[in-house]
Amino acid sequence: MQPELLIATSNPGKIKEIKAILSPLNLKITTPKDLALNLRVAETGGTYLENALLKARAYYQAAGLPVLADDSGLEVDALDGAPGLHSARFSPKENANDADRRAYLLEQLSDKAQPWHAHFHCTAVLLSSSDNFTKKVGRCRGLIIPEERGNTGFGYDPVFYIPEYGATMAELGPDIKNKISHRAKALIALNPVISKLLGINELN
């Protein structure tokens, strides 16, 4: 029987990425939907770590399984680090979607001098009990561009350009993105910890 790990997100894009990044591990990845969990965790923390732990602990208490949670954000230099912790809620529009948030971001940058330097940040935590957790951090640097490009990502990916690849995050495709993204870096760093905690081996 495979060891089981619950991922504390219902975001389809995140779920797909996390499953791909953790695919080298001989592991059963369980989602909240698999367990009929419909938790709404208020992300009231003042840091990425605090928000990740709020989610991890809520899901651990609900399911009693080891939990992987992360909190991520886009930090733009010209906006003094915004949207940052509020990246998923960065739009005054009610029920805003990803496109609304990207449009609002570009609106906020419209009077700022280019280039618009930015980076994605991810803090990921593996929680094995209420008080026992390991955290890893990943960052990916790039530029915000004024037009959307690509359709394979989500969130701010279509306007996040990576000069080394000459492409936006949404143009890279999952094979590359899941090696170089902020989330990939954090989760890859957690792989040995997950393996040790759950007593599993890598498949390849």
Image: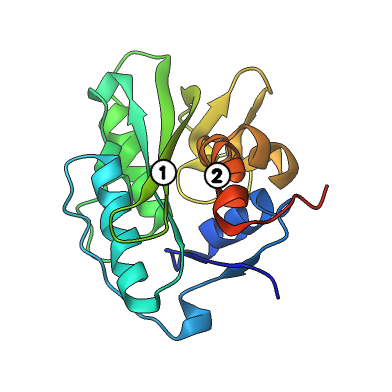
Q: In terms of depth relative to the viewer, which is nearer, 68 or 82?
A: 68
Vertical comparison of 81 with 172: above or below: above
Residue drawn at (35%, 61%) of the image: 129
Q: Determine which residue is flagged by label 2.
A: 193
| Coloring basis for residues | rainbow
Label 1–label 2 contact, CB within 8 A: yes
Locate residue 156, reporting x and y percent: 45, 43
Q: Quadrant of residue 198?
A: bottom right
- Say which residue label 1 marks: 134
Question: Where residue 64 appears, x then y in whole percent?
Answer: 40, 74
Outermost residue toward the right? 204
Q: Which quadrant: the N terminus?
A: bottom right
Decide if residue 49 is in sight here: yes
Q: Is residue 1 left or right of residue 105?
A: right
> Mark 1: few, some, or many residues within 10 Å (few <14, many ≥20)?
few
Q: Secondary structure at mark 2?
A: helix
In the displayed structure, 110 sits above or below 89; it is above
Kind of element beneath mark 1: strand
Front residue of 147 and 43: 43
Image position of 118 (left or right of 27):
left
Looking at the rendered structure, the number of numbered marks drawn on it comes to: 2
Question: 33 or 13: which is nearer to us?
Answer: 33
Q: Is residue 96 visible?
A: no
Image coords of residue 50 (percent x, y): 24, 46
Residue type at numbered disc 2? Val
Question: What type is the residue that disc 1 sits on?
Answer: Thr
Q: Residues within 10 Å of mark 2 (few under 14, many from 20)?
A: some
Instruction: Tell me: residue 194, above or below residue 75.
Output: below
Please report whichever mark, 1 or 2, sits nearer to the chain's N-terminal start: 1
Quarter-wise, where is residue 130 in the image? Answer: bottom left
